[in-house]
Amino acid sequence: MATRQLRYREALREAMIEEMERDPNVFLMGEEVGHYQGAYKVSEGMLEKFGDKRVVDTPIAESGFAGIGVGAAMVGLRPIIEFMTWNFSAVAFDQILNNAAKVRQMSGGQFSCPIVFRGPNASARQVGSQHSHAMEHFYATVPGLKVVAPAFPKDAKGLMKAAIRDDNPVLVMESETLYSVKGDVPDDLSDVVIGKAQIARPGKDVTLIAYSRATHIALDAATALEKVGISAEVVDLRSLRPLDEDTICDSVRRTHRAVVVHEGWPYGGVGAEIVDRIQRLAFDSLEAPVLRVTTLDVGMPYNAKLEQLCMPQTARVVAAVTKVVARGRA
Amino acid sequence: MAEETLDAESKAPLTRSSSELTHLADLYRQMFLIRRLEEEAARAYSTGKIGGFLHLYIGQEAVGVGAIAALKKDDYVITTYRDHGIAIAKGMSSRALMAELYGKVTGCSKGLGGSMHMFDKDHHMLGGYGIVGGHIPLAAGVAFASKYRNDGRVTLCFFGEGAVSIGGFHEGLSLAALWKLPIVFICENNEYSMGTPLSRSMSVEDVSMKALGYGIDRDRFFCEDVLEVERRIGEAVLRARETSMPTLVEVRTYRFRGHSMSDPAKYRTQAELDEHKGRDPVHRARADLKTRGFVEARVAELEASVEAEVADAVKFAEESAEPEAALLAETTYDGPFAS
């Protein structure tokens, strides 16, 4: 089976192009997706390929075009709605929460909403207080939505295709800092499905659970920990809702210790959900409390040093692992 | 008895005026049905058989009935939480409506939606929505799909004047105008957004002026005659269908009941209410029917058939089963949650 090296953004683009070639009901809509070629060049060349009927530039009106996507999906189209960043989805939150996620139940199952919302999420580089939000925590709590957050080009392509084919609203959390990352992308992506995590690095002393950019931080930490004799297993979630609790708990049952790493604040959120599942489902296997390494509990500062301080870092992961490994290891 | 008269009428040649008369009778029946269904719903609400919110359409029936009469069967309709009348006018059965209000599994949304969420896919009724203005971009999306597929359908989007100040209205109209979508935006201006009169919620008195900023056509009229509503909305529907251009139509109307069942409507005077009730479009249609030659016995027969239909709907709702918990998972996701 053929495998190629692609950048994360190229993998996303390939997924969209393949699905648009397969299904004429699929279209891409968002700010600067067409003539500008995409604010982060994810949709580069797609306007030329598909024309302005299917690659639709919008004015700056997230609530409006998110709602347009939901309405179009209800009557059979399969929209891909790009948010230039997920931060801007805050003004479209009502459309996602009250319409996309709810129309199926409100209609007693008569209508579905096969729509993809996608865009870069969480911190970039010094983009400040309003442009650095980890929005997945707000959305992952909503029944009716699916939320995925790929870390690698292979999963970016596989999950984007799966999202487009899904009959429910799927939110794809990308990352500006990952768009240029290269990775192997096989032709066969049948093992990339929504709701299935993967072991990004096997280990035996502690489980690091992460997704999106934080998976790379966890892998860096695992490399650093190896040098001090600690073998860390990295679980890359890929999907946040549904959450693959089996893969998480199987790993914890083997390592007896866990640290969750993600961007976003420590109050509630995906990390707290993971900790809850571990303590409920793998309590007897635990040798130490589960710790979380998150963005600090403050808004994101512009200053580069303070930004780094606030974001989850390899050193903080190593410190957390050192704590949980020390515990109970007599 | 009326039988002889009825026979005489049915044997009359189908002239333009007689077919118009039949049409008006049909519209009157729909309006009278909506009113009677809602009166029974209010009664059931007061005895606790219907819960939550109940926003009645009483007084505004001619807007929805007249507007939807201007549509083809396959055209789309979408509205707010004041949706019972719109749903019935679009073809939903009285049973499905009443059972939904009762929260029964035989309701249009299996008892999961309630008063504010009347959906009927078979009749292209795309639902009632509870967040003011939130459905307006969604309606534009339905019209976007029609243009994308070139299916020739028109979307009617209803909302109150209370929705005109929120972003969804402006983004919906802005995009519909920009992309020339086949849609008619119908503002049912009933003068009060909940308890706040238009004079305290908008800087202009003429809602239709909002169309000017988006460069789309507009219309504005009082809802007194259901046939006039049909004719005026029909012009906008034709514009949407033939030129794919949206229109904003302000239909001035009045609700005879409070905003919802819990609203005693103390913000308006009895004299004001009485004045509007004196111009009740449902009574007007009944009087017009008789003026145009529909005998009283025929009107009475029509009304009796409505009473029977309403009684049947209530009985059906009362006797229907409640939804099972198993419905919750299957109506939250289409297909398995974890693939």
Image (cartoon, coloured by chain):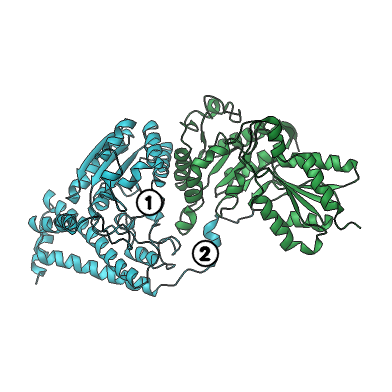
Chain colours: A green, B cyan
Q: Are marks 1 and 2 in contact (CB under 8 Å)?
A: no
The span from disc 1 to disc 2 (Cα, nearest Å) is 23 Å
- Residue to which mark 1 is pinned: B124
Percent x, y for residue A182? 73, 31
B213 and B179: which one is in front? B213
Whether residue B164 appears in this view of the structure is: yes
Q: Position of A289 compared to A75: left or right?
A: right
> Label 2 marks which chain's residue?
B
* Mark 1 surroundings: few (<14), some (14-19) or many (≥20) residues within 10 A: many
* Mark 2 surroundings: few (<14), some (14-19) or many (≥20) residues within 10 A: some
B97 and A234: which one is in front? A234
Count of marks placed on residues: 2
- Residue to which mark 2 is pinned: B327
A81 and B41: which one is in front? B41
Q: Position of A124 compared to B251: left or right?
A: right
Say which residue appears at 39% left-offset and 39% top-offset.
B172
Percent x, y for residue B318? 37, 73
Q: Position of A41 compared to A208: left or right?
A: left
Residue type at tag 1: His
Say which residue appears at 44% left-offset and 72% top-offset.
B321
Say which residue appears at 36% left-offset and 33% top-offset.
B177
